[in-house]
Image (cartoon, rainbow, N blue to C red):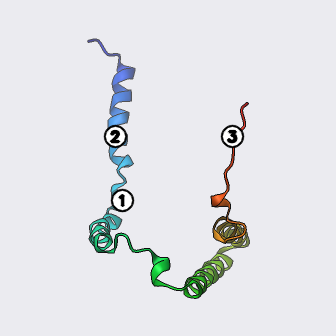
Amino acid sequence: MDKSIGDIGKMQGIAAANPAIARPDHGAKHMFIVPGMVLAYPLRGIHTTSLLSGTIIFLEWIGLVAVGLTCAFAASKVTQIVACLFALQGIVYNVPGARTKDKAYTRSCL
């Protein structure tokens, strides 16, 4: 098979890109996968809402949002605005009453 020089260059570029896709620079995070699987096995079937009351979960969420918004405020005004939008999205998506994840949406045909 006769390959042109351009084709060989493309093949070498693809071969060089494959290790980058594996993200070896994130290898330190991979060490948490096995312990997470080991911990998840005995906890399968247990839902957090069955262990914790709604008040505790709500207070935890408020605390995490407060920490996140404080960090966003320290970073920049734009980051704080984006963090506020994400917090609002979390409320709209999860809180009963609005809870958009339970709504059925239809796709329009173009």
Which residue is disc 3 drawn over? 107
- The image quarter in which residue 7 lies: top left
Q: Are marks 1 and 3 in contact (CB under 8 Å)?
A: no
- Residue sitting nearer the eye, 93 or 53: 53
Quarter occupied by the C terminus: top right
The type of residue carrying mark 2 is Ala
* Left-right relation of 8 to 74: left
Query: Residue 99, located in which quarter of the rendered image?
Result: bottom right
- In three-dimensional space, the C-alpha distance between marks 1 and 2, rounded to whole angstroms, equals 15 Å
Compared across the picture, whether 16 is left or right of 90 comes to left
> Which tag, 2 or 3, sits closer to the chain's start?
2
In terms of secondary structure, where does tag 2 sit? helix
Q: Which residue is located at x 70 percent, y 67 percent?
A: 92
Mark 1 vs mark 3, foreground winner is 3
Q: Which residue is mark 1?
A: 25
Q: Which of pointers 1 and 3 lies earlier in the amino acid sequence?
A: 1
Q: Position of residue 36 (x, y in %)?
A: 32, 70
Measuring 63% from the left and 68% from the top, which residue is drawn there? 94
Type of the residue with mark 3:
Arg
Residue 50 image label: none
| Residue 10 vertical position relative to residue 69 in the rendered view, above or below | above
Which badge, 1 or 2, comes first in the chain's sequence? Answer: 2
Residue 55 placed where, x, y %?
59, 87
Location of mark 2 (residue): 16
Question: Local crowd at mark 1 within 10 Å, few (<14), some, or many (≥20)?
Answer: few
- For image coordinates 53% across by 86% down, the residue present is 53
Residue 21: give x, y in percent of width and height. Answer: 38, 47
* Placement of the N terminus among the 4 image quadrants: top left
Instruction: Give the CA distance from mark 1 to mark 3.
Output: 40 Å
